[in-house]
Amino acid sequence: MIRLRSRKLCKSSSNVSSGSGRGGDDKSYKAGGEIEWELRPGGMLVQKRENGASVREEMITVRVSTVSHWHDISIEATSTFGELKMILSMVTTLEPRAQRLLFRGKEREDDDFLHMIGVKDMDKVLLLEDPAIKERKSHALARNQAIGNPCHTITV
């Protein structure tokens, strides 16, 4: 049997003022003596940065290759493949649900984070059109052409 103890994630004000080696001017403590925490995309709980506005997210450039073209996309490293698909939909006019993104030979899900999968600056991602959606488009196009050009005409 394993027992888990829950630990309090904030320091009480008495510990802050007692001079526990941290000093009273440490900016990670709020006025009430609590530490602010944030949950990172990977699920890690870390101490919140004091000036989050000045800390900018790392931007990476991903080279997305289609069959005949390639696009260099600048995106935050902590973005998801779904967000990358949204940007690609503006560049390629291919709907996000019709896109299949492959990185290192595997198709990636929309909720996979780029940095968690290992996508780094100037890495290559392959963009393919979903074959099922491509087939549906070709059938719809054939149907529209058949309606617009009837095979036989009746003359009176």
Image: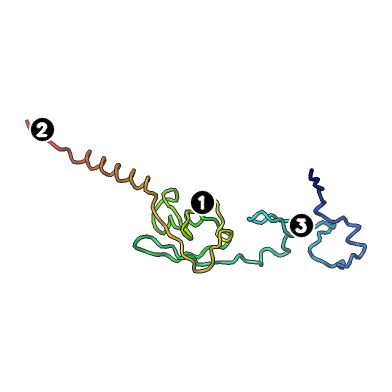
Which of the two discs, 2 and 1, labels the residue nearer the N terminus? 1
User: Looking at the rendering, which quadrant does residue 65 occupy?
Assistant: bottom left
Quadrant into which the N terminus falls: top right
* 133 in relation to 32, above or below: above
Which residue is label 3 attached to? 36
Identity of the residue drawn at 30% across and 45% down: 138
Q: Which secondary structure, mark 3?
A: loop
Which residue is label 2 attached to? 154
Which residue is label 1 attached to? 109
Relative to 151, 54 lies left or right: right
Mark 2 residue type? Ile
Mark 1 residue type? Glu
Q: Nearer the viewer, mark 2 or mark 3?
A: 3
Identity of the residue drawn at 86% across and 67% down: 22
Which of the two discs, 3 and 1, labels the residue nearer the N terminus? 3
Which of the two discs, 2 and 3, labels the residue nearer the N terminus? 3
Rounded to the nearest angstrom, the CA distance separating label 2 from label 3 is 79 Å
Relative to 74, 47 lies left or right: right
* 123 in relation to 150, above or below: below
Identity of the residue drawn at 90% across and 59% down: 15
Q: Which secondary structure, mark 1?
A: loop
Identity of the residue drawn at 56% across and 56% down: 113
Circles 3 and 1: CB distance less than 8 Å? Answer: no
